Image (spheres, grey):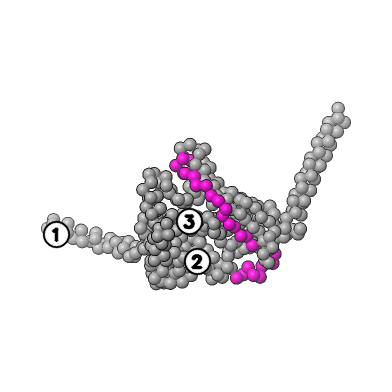
């Protein structure tokens, strides 16, 4: 009887909390990335943490009740921190910089700590140019960039160029 | 005694009025020197000769727009490409080109507070709609003591907005 009561209590408790559990899963759709919006999104304060998702042809940023949607087609340029590093130093340079101790070899970077950056340039309804910068865990910027490109965004550093340009440079030397 | 006191008070009042008048005249002269501009259009920061990371370029641009909106004194601040800018009277266009930077170190800044400064030099050209240069200036953004490199972009934006505020006004003519 006692075991039966305990089981019933457990079942009731689980049932009571199950909507919350479902909600917490619903809040983090697959492919969402925790980011910090450094600057550039309309109606969002600088240095606001939130979740970034790419789906349905849009880039979604959400922070509590604040939600910003940008059409991927309006994104004129999407560049990761890795792209910038390769453009400036080439692949070999990037490897060398990564190996340098305490970030001493890092190129002019806005951010001190080890994180990935994603920079986008997009146009508003009046064609005005905006820029937005996000920081996120290492490796996530490339994922977001790929998804954005697949949904209609453009980039000044295509994946092939990012991989082949430094090689061409090395051949010249 | 009373007469002396009255004389002193009258003298002080007179001097105050003179000083106030002088300051007013200086303000009027300064205002008269300002060029008339009701709106400004900010072009994306260019860095053709110096390779600048995209995030730095965008941070400079966004900070510049924010500071011009706060302190520039313009009725409208337009972004590059904004089609509404075409109809704006007395529009000034701001072109900014990165001319140099010196990379500092936030770690050094934190440890020594004097070494490790980051600085970025940007050549700013304020021109009219037809492209005629109205004002040119080299602006240096620095981060000397504490904070990340993002402070250098903020410093540049603040200084540029001040230059705009000091030289342009929507109400006065040349």
x, y percent for residue A49: 42, 56
Q: Residue furthest top?
A: B1
The residue pinned by badge 3 equals: B53
Q: Residue furthest left?
A: A1
Whether the magenta-drawn stretch holds residue B93 is answered as: yes
Image height of A137 relative to A144, above or below: above
x, y percent for residue A32: 36, 63
Mark 3 or 1, closer to the camera? 3
Residue A122's label in the rendered image is 2
The tally of labels here is: 3
Q: Residue at x 41, y 62 (%)?
A: A168
Q: Residue at x 32, y 65 (%)?
A: A30
Q: CA distance from mark 3 to mark 1?
A: 65 Å
- What are the residue bounds of the magenta stretch? B83-110
The residue pinned by badge 1 equals: A4
Image height of B137 relative to A60, above or below: above
Q: Residues within 10 Å of mark 3 (few under 14, many from 20)?
A: many
Query: In this view of the protein, can residue A95 be seen by the observer?
Result: yes
């Amino acid at each position: 009887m006692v075991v039966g009561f305990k089981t019933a209590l457990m079942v009731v408790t689980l049932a009571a909390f199950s909507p919350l559990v479902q909600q917490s899963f619903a809040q983090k759709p697959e492919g969402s990335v925790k980011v910090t919006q450094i600057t550039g999104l309309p109606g969002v304060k600088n240095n606001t943490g939130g979740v970034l998702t790419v789906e349905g042809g849009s880039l979604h940023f959400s922070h509590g009740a604040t939600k910003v949607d940008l059409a991927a087609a309006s994104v004129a340029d999407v560049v990761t921190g890795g792209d910038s590093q390769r453009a400036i130093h080439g692949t070999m340079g990037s490897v060398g910089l990564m190996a340098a101790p305490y970030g001493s070899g890092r190129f002019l970077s806005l951010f001190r700590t080890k994180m990935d950056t994603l920079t986008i340039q997009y146009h508003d309804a009046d064609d005005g140019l905006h820029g937005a910068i996000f920081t996120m865990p290492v490796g996530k910027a490339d994922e977001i960039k790929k998804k954005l490109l697949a949904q209609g965004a453009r980039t000044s550093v295509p994946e092939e160029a990012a991989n082949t340009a430094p090689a061409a440079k090395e051949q010249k030397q | 005694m009373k007469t002396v006191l009255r004389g002193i008070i009258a003298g002080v009042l007179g001097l105050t009025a003179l000083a106030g008048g002088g300051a007013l005249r200086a303000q009027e002269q300064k205002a008269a020197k300002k060029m008339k501009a009701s709106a400004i259009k900010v072009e994306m920061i260019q860095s053709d000769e110096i390779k600048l990371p995209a995030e730095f370029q965008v941070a400079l641009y966004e900070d510049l727009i924010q500071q011009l909106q706060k302190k520039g004194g313009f009725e409208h601040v337009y972004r590059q490409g904004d089609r509404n800018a075409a109809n704006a009277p007395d529009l000034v266009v701001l072109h900014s080109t990165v001319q140099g930077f010196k990379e500092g170190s936030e770690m050094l800044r934190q440890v020594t507070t004097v070494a490790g400064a980051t600085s970025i030099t940007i050549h700013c050209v304020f021109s009219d709609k037809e492209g005629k240069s109205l004002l040119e200036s080299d602006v240096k953004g620095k981060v000397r003591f504490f904070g990340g490199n993002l402070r250098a972009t903020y410093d540049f934006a603040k200084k540029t907005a001040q230059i705009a505020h000091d030289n342009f006004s929507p109400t006065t003519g040349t």
